[in-house]
Amino acid sequence: MQEHDLSFVRAEMVLAQAAPSRERGLTAWLRKNMFASVTDTILTLLGLFLIAWFLPGFLRWAFVDAQWTGADRTVCATASQGGVQPDGWSGACWAFVNAKFAQFMYGRYTLSERWRVDLTAILFVLLLVPLLIPRFPRKGLNAILLFLVFPFVAFFLLVGGYFGLRYVPTTEWGGLLVTMVLSIVGIAISLPFGIVLALGRRSQMPAIKLICVIFIEVVRGVPLVTVLFLASVMLPLFMPAGMTFDRFLRALVGVVLFASAYMAEVVRGGLQAMPKGQYEGADSLGLSYWQKMNLIILPQALKLVIPGIVNTFIGLFKDTSLVYIIGMFDLLGIVRQNFTDANWASAQTPMSGLLFAGFVFWIFCFGMSRYSIYMERRLDTGQRS
Amino acid sequence: MASQDTLHASDPARVSWMNDPKIRGIIFQVLVVAILSAAIYWIWGNTVENLRRANISSGYGFLNGRSGFDVSQSLIHFNADSTFGRALIVGLLNTVLVAVVGVITATILGFLIGIGRLSGNWLIAKICMIYVEIFRNIPPLLVIFFWYLGVLSVLPAPRDSIGLPFGSYLNSRGFFLPKAIWEEGAWLIPAALVVAIIAIFAIARWSYRRQMKTGQRFPVLLTALVLILGLPTLATLAAGVPFTFEYPQQGAFNLTGGSQIKPEFLSLYLALSFYTAAFIAEIVRAGILGVSRGQTEAANALGLRAGPTLRLVVVPQAMRIIIPPLTSQYLNLTKNSSLAVFVGYPDLVQIGQTTMNQTGQAIEVVSIWMLIYLGLSLSMSLFMNWFNDRMALVER
C-alpha cells in the first residue's frame, strides 16, 4: 500500500558464519566433556592424576623393564635376591609365562599326544563359529555335528584308549584344557537338566514342583566350594564300596549340579516371558504336554534366554577356577602351582603369572559378554509383546 | 439344548482313566517320588556301609570334642582346647565379618563407579567403564590371588615396613594400626554414640512428620553429623580422655603391639569388594537409566538443581529397580567369601575343612556348611525384602 523506506531492514540474508572457535573442535569438546564446571574440572584432574600415577609405572613394569626370555629365575631377580638384575629393578617376568606356556595350556598332558588337544580345539572352533554367526546357513546340520557328533570325537581324542590312541588319564590334564572342558561340558549337560528343572518348577504337580524348588533353592543358596566338596568327599561315600570316581568326573558332577540350578532359573525366566496365548494355543490344538513344550514353548523361550545362558556360561567359566580346591589344576590353579617352582620363584613371578591368567580369562569372558549383548540386540527386535 | 444335556449325561466318561490328566499326574508323581526314595535309600545304605568300613562314627557328637588346632584370627576367645563346635562358630563369625565389611565397601564403591559411568565427564566415565569391564570378566579367585600373592606378600618384610600416617605400618605380615587401650570411664563414649543414634532417629521422624504437615524442612543430615561426632567427643572430654593409643613398635623381626589386620583378611576383603563393586556399578547404572528422562526434566522444570534432582527425584525411584538385584549381589559376595579357603583366612569353609581333615566327618561338615549358608542367604534376602518393601513406591 504505502511505499515505506525499509532500508533499515536487511534486504538479503546474512551468510552463515562458522561457529565461534571455542564452540567447535577439540576445545569445545574438552570444555563440554571434561571441564564443564568446577566439579567437572576437579574430577578430570583427579582422573588424569590417577592415570598419570598408575599408567606409566604399569607400562614400564609390563613392557619396558619386563624380561621376555630366560632360562630360570635369575633373569627375574635382583642381585640381592640372587639374580642378574640391578637392585631396585622391578619388571614383569614374562620369561616365566613363556617357559611355562605349554603347561598352562595342557597341564601335564603327555607331550607327544598334545596334537590331539589342538585338533579338538580346532574342530570345536570350526563347528562353533558358524553356529554363532546368524548369517551362516545350515544351522541344523551344524548343530547336529556340534552337539551329537563332536562330543564323541572329542572324548575319543582327549581321553584316548581306542583306535590306537594312547590313553591319557584325566589326572594328567590341566591348564586351559581343564578350564575349557569343565565349563563347556558342564554347560552342555546342565542345559537339559536346567530345562527339566525349570519345567518341574512351573509344573502343576505339587510333588514335582516341591522337589525342583528345593533342589534349585538349596544349590543357589550355597557357595560352589561346598558343592564341590560335596561332590568330591561325599560322592565316593554314596556309591557302593569299590566303585571309584575319577577326580575329574567328581569335579564335573559338582559343576553340573551347581550350573543346572542357575540354568533352571534362566530358563524359567524365558518360560514366564512367554505370553499365555502360546500355552493356550498349543492346548487348543490338542497337543500333549511334551509336544506343547518341544514344539511351541521351548523353542521360543530358549531363544529368548540365549543372553542369560551365555551369562551363566561366563559365570561357570570363571567358577571353574575353584576346582583347585579338590585337587584339579585348571588354568588359574596351574599358574598358582607354578609359583612354588623353585626354578622360577621370584618377587615378580606371581604378579606376572596372575596377569597372564587374568588376561586369558578376560579375553574369553569379554568376548562372550560382547556376543551376548549382540544377541540381545538382535533378538530384541521381534519379541516385544 | 435338552438333547445335548442328555447326551452329556448319558456319556459320563468316554476317555479311559489312563488318559485323565489328573490321574496321570498322580501316577507320575508317585513314580518320581518312589524312584527318588529308592535312590536315597540306596545311597543311605551305601553310605552307612562305607562309613562302617572306614570306622567313622556318624552324628554330630564330634562337635563337642577338643579341636586341637589354633585359629589365626578370631573374634571370640579360642585356643586349641576349645571344641570343634566353637571353632565353627569362630568361622561363621569370620565369614559374617568379611561379608559385612565387604558389602559396605562394595556398595559405596559400586555406587560411585555406577554413577561415574553415567557422568558427563568423559574421562571419569571411561575410567569407570574400564574398571567395570576388567573386574566383571575375571574370576573372583584371581582377584584374591592378585591381592594376596601379587601385592600383599611382596610388600617389604617387617624390618623395612612402609610407614603410614597415624603410626600405622604396612608390611608383608599385614596392616598394623595403633590400638586404643580403654581406661576407666570409657563406657561413656559408646553410650554417647548410642544416645546420638537414637536422637537422630527421633529427629528424623519428627522432621518427616513436620514436613508432611507444614512443608518445612529441617537440616536432618547436618544435625545428625553434629550429633554423631559431637556427643562422643563431649563424652570423651567429660570422662577426661579415657584412652591411650598403643602404637606398633618396630622390632628386629616383627612389629609388636598395636592391632594387626592380617593379609589373608585384607586380600579377601579387598578382592570381594573390588569384584562385587563392578557388578553393583552395573546395577546402579541400569537403575538410574531405568528412571524415565521425563522425571529429570520435570525436576529441572521445577527449578531443582542437578544435586537435589539426583537426590530427591532420580535416586529414590532408581532404588526400586536397584534393590532386588543388589540383594543377589550381596548374597553372591557372602557366598564368594567361601573363597577364603584358598588363602587360609579362617572362615566357615576353611575351619570346616580343617575339621573334616581331623575328624573325617565329611557328611556332617558339608551339611553344617549348607545349612549355615542357606540360613545366611535366607536371612539376608528376608532383610532385603523388608527393606525393599519400605523403599517401594507407595501408590496413591
Image (cartoon, coloured by chain):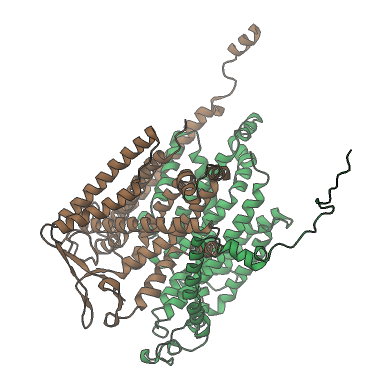
Observer-nearest residue: B103 or A272?
A: B103
Is A283 rendered above or below residue A162? above
Observer-nearest residue: A11 or A352?
A: A11
Q: Residue at x 41, y 50 (%)?
A: A219
Left or right relative to B97: residue B313: right
Residue B347: x and y in percent read 30, 60
Q: Quadrant of residue B2?
A: top right
Residue A53: x and y in percent read 46, 75
Left or right relative to A145: residue B194: left
Residue that sits furthest to the top in the current view: B2
Left or right relative to B250: residue B387: right
Q: For chain A, give the colour.
A: green
Q: Is residue A107 visible?
A: no
Q: Quadrant of the N terminus of chain A?
A: top right
Is B184 rendered above or below residue B396? below
How many numbered circles does the render carry?
A: 0
Observer-nearest residue: B243 or A286?
A: B243
Is A275 rendered above or below residue A181? above
Q: Quadrant of residue A293?
A: top right
Residue A48: x and y in percent read 51, 70
Q: Is residue B314 visible?
A: yes
Q: For chain B, give the colour.
A: brown
Q: Residue at x 84, y 54 (%)?
A: A12
Q: Residue at x 45, y 65 (%)?
A: A321
Is B27 rendered above or below residue B278? above
Q: Residue at x 64, y 68 (%)?
A: A26
Left or right relative to A282: residue B308: left
Observer-nearest residue: B112 or A139?
A: B112
Q: Quadrant of the C terminus of chain A?
A: top right
Residue A308: x and y in percent read 55, 51
Q: Quadrant of residue A294?
A: top right
